[in-house]
């Protein structure tokens, strides 16, 4: 069974069995959970969190893209997604924006977010998932 978990701006949790919401949940968890911190599998998650302590360089942009590919690769391996597209761009002195587009057939799910690089406090100031992520279906 594929489930989707969503949290509205008031912190109310909704669980659904809609397949698209399951893809959204899988994508968000793959990116936002720190690698080696998932109770079921240490291999699950991403390493983008490690960049919050680093200095922003051109290499940081490449690392974010590689970390996102690594974190979401399982979605195509298990045929949950037909393809995944990742866009990454440097914004200013301390920010990298990224978008992960997960395709199920001809339906895309886009997860947009950013990582503050070299600004550890920026990552931890958000109180819940709704404040931190921008997810939508196109």
Image (spheres, helix red, strand yellow):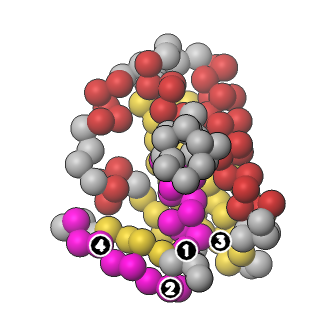
Relative to residue 15, is residue 72 depicted above or below? above
Q: CA distance from mark 3 to mark 1?
A: 13 Å
Which residue, given by chain and number where applicable, does mark 4 sit on?
13
Image location of residue 100, percent across then percent down: 62, 54
Disc 4 packing (10 Å; few <14; some 14–19; many ≥20): few
Which residue, given by chain and number where applicable, does mark 3 sit on?
108
**Residue at x-position 66% and y-position 28%:** 63
Which residue, given by chain and number where applicable, does mark 1 sit on?
22
Q: CA distance from mark 4 to mark 1?
A: 14 Å
Image location of residue 134, percent across then percent down: 42, 58
Residue 17, labelled with which disc?
2
Image location of residue 61, percent across then percent down: 62, 29
Q: Is residue 41 visible?
A: yes
In this image, 102 relative to 54: left or right? right
- Quarter of the image with the N terminus in it: bottom right
In depth, the one of 5 and 104 nearer the eye is 5
Of tags 2 and 3, the one toward the viewer is: 2
Task: Indicate which disc, 4 or 1, sits on the residue closer to the N terminus.
Answer: 4
Q: CA distance from mark 2 to mark 4?
A: 14 Å
Task: Indicate which disc, 2 or 3, sits on the residue closer to the N terminus.
Answer: 2
């Amino acid at each position: 069974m594929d489930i989707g978990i969503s949290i509205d701006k008031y912190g109310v949790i909704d669980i659904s069995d809609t397949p698209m919401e399951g893809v959204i949940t899988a994508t968000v968890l793959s990116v936002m959970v720190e690698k080696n911190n998932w109770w079921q599998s240490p291999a699950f998650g991403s390493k983008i969190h490690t960049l919050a302590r680093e200095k922003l360089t051109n290499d940081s942009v490449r690392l974010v893209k590689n970390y996102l590919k690594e974190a979401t690769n399982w979605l195509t391996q298990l045929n949950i997604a037909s393809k995944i597209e990742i866009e990454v761009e440097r914004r200013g002195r301390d920010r990298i924006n990224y978008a992960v587009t997960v395709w199920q057939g001809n339906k895309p799910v886009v997860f947009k977010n950013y990582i503050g690089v070299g600004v550890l406090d920026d990552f931890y100031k958000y109180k819940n998932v709704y404040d931190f992520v921008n997810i939508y279906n196109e």
